[in-house]
Amino acid sequence: MVRYYLSGNEAIVEGAIRAGCRYYAGYPITPSTEIMERISVKFSEIGGVFMQMEDEIAAICSVIGASWAGAKAMTATSGPGFSLMQEGIGYAAMTETPIVVVDVQRAGPSTGQATRVASGDIMQAKWGSSGDYQVIAVSPWSVQEAYEQTINAFNLAEKYRVPVLLLTEEAIGHLRERMDVVKDIEIFNRRKKPDAAPFGTEERDGVPPMPTFGECAKVLVTGSTHDSYGFRRTDDPLAQDKLVSRLNEKIINNREKIIDYENYYLEDATLVIISYGFTARSSLFAVEALRAEGRKIGMLRLKTLWPFPDSLKRYIGAKANVLFVPEMNKGQVAGEVRKYVSCQVVTFTQTNGEVIYPDAIIEQLRRYL
Amino acid sequence: MSRDMQQYLRPGINSTPFCPGCGHGILMGLILRAIHQLELNMDEMLFVSGIGCAAWIPSPHFNADTLHILHGRAIPAATGAKMFNPKLRVVVIGGDGDLADIGGNHLIHAARRNIDLTIICASNMVYGMTGGQVSSTTSIGAFTQTTTQGNPYQPLDLCKLVIATGATYVARHSVAQPFALINAIKKALQINGFCFIEVLSPCPTQFGRHNQLDTPVAMIKNLMEKCITKNKAKKSSPEELMGKIITGEFTNGVY
């Protein structure tokens, strides 16, 4: 087995290359820059195309262009750059262009604290572009998972023809840990079907096969409302409704297949922590410390943030009566959790640019035990 | 459009969305004639455009791969496709607002990188699609919906700009110079490197009617009067060149 000692940012590069990524365009921004530095070197060795563009808008648009030219393509950025990419993310959703966007979250808003950590872009990831659309967003909690989730992100992007966002955090990006290269891992490659409609299916929630530029398909791609062959239908109410509905339903109706999570000590837990990303590491430490005292506490770790796991009530079991959501933001995921449960939801937020330590979680939890 | 050109049009396309008197239809025909004369295979071509009237020249009309992307972002999207698949012959078609205003940053950086792209900027000196607002190429004093007292700012000379930033081939012609324009497009399609053609295209609907150029004929006549060839310009005094637009080829960094 090949074993590395890497940072989360470096592991993302290893995962991308393993998934088949051969086009990367980016713009330097702390704390994501190591991704573009490493991939520029790796691509020169294995034959990928690396472009340092003039801004994040150019980066995401060139990734979209490369994706249509047949590439598995990725860009990486952080909060302010992620904001600049939002129009491109909306375009990729509308044109069903598979791309992977990494957001190594830092403390915002705006320039904020460039070298400090936060999870403040969860809502921006879902709602940052105009109109009604769906994205898939995944959140790793370790260097190993940064590698695996990057591969997963490419697979989901190709499978559902959707922008997939890898929402990681500065603390994961710069964390150094052991990373094992997984031998048997599924790699999903783009489905092609000559002469098939590139933007429509028989099913209301289907994912059409995707043609590639330069292969005589004469593809017509537009971000305007279009029919199944890409012709603009900018004043047709039925075309608008049909397209927008399918773009949403192809993700929402497949959410059980997309959503991934992990359970810890949930069998008899009355108090459940719902956690994700780096914070889940501290949460698990807190759970295990309190379990050692005999407390009935467990944890649900969300690996997928969008589409949001709306069945989390089923995942956490009937005994849970208090849900505790620690986050490095002002309660972005806690608000989502409240939509889907009727029991008490307690938020624990921290926006000081530092990770949440286990002791802080334990201290808060004691109030409810 | 002649029957020879029909093969370059996407099946089912029988009309264009352009207003009467718009120069973009002329330009569309000239681009296809250049492709026809060079006997290029449309299956190996990719047309990228942003948002605006000129962006509709290739999308959906041209029977090739067409990428109709975000406003101002045609050049980066073209860069991504070209860099990943260099076999594609990539042509960007857009207006002045699209390529020079919102997309100006991408224009200069693509020229700097000297990426093998053909950029055709249909400059009508106004934002046509949104109803006639001032653009970066609107001439001083011109009236638009947002410069009702006359445009106070000097226009951007796009050819000078891309020459300064490293373009390989640069040319400017109006749609009233069709043969020179076809030749320029042919050269730009054949030359490796960043090729830029500024095409002066009349917009009677949104520009002409605010500037005492109410008819398509008046606009074309005005373009012919305003344009002066590079060679004539060399022999003219600065006074004679006031308000004139210099046309011709500007290669080897010489304007």
Image (spheres, coloured by chain):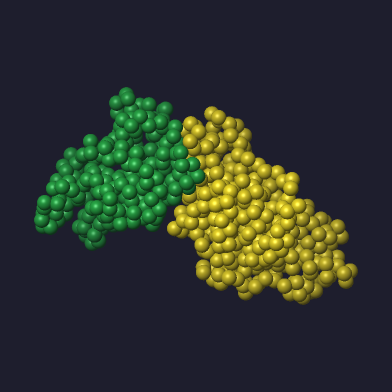
Chain colours: A yellow, B green
Seen from this angle, which residue lies furthest front? Answer: A45
Quadrant position of the N terminus of chain B in the picture: top left
* Residue at (70, 50) in percent of width and height: A259
Seen from this angle, which residue lies furthest right? Answer: A294
Q: Is residue A280 above or below residue B121?
A: below
Q: Is residue A7 left or right of residue A51?
A: right
Image spot of residue A254 (x, y percent): 67, 43
Q: Is residue A152 left or right of residue A313?
A: left
Camera-side residue: B65 or B194? B194
Image spot of residue A64 (x, y percent): 51, 47
* Residue at (41, 32) in percent of width and height: B42
Camera-side residue: B146 or A69? A69
Q: Is residue A234 visible?
A: no
Image quadrant of residue A120? bottom right
Image quadrant of residue A293? bottom right
Q: Is residue A273 visible?
A: yes
* Residue at (73, 61) in percent of width and height: A178
Image spot of residue B12 (x, y percent): 41, 28
Q: Is residue A244 above or below residue A85?
A: above
Q: Is residue B195 above or below residue A361?
A: above
Q: Is residue A134 left or right of residue B190?
A: right
* Residue at (13, 48) in percent of width and height: B232
Image spot of residue B117 (x, y percent): 39, 45
Camera-side residue: A249 or A15? A15
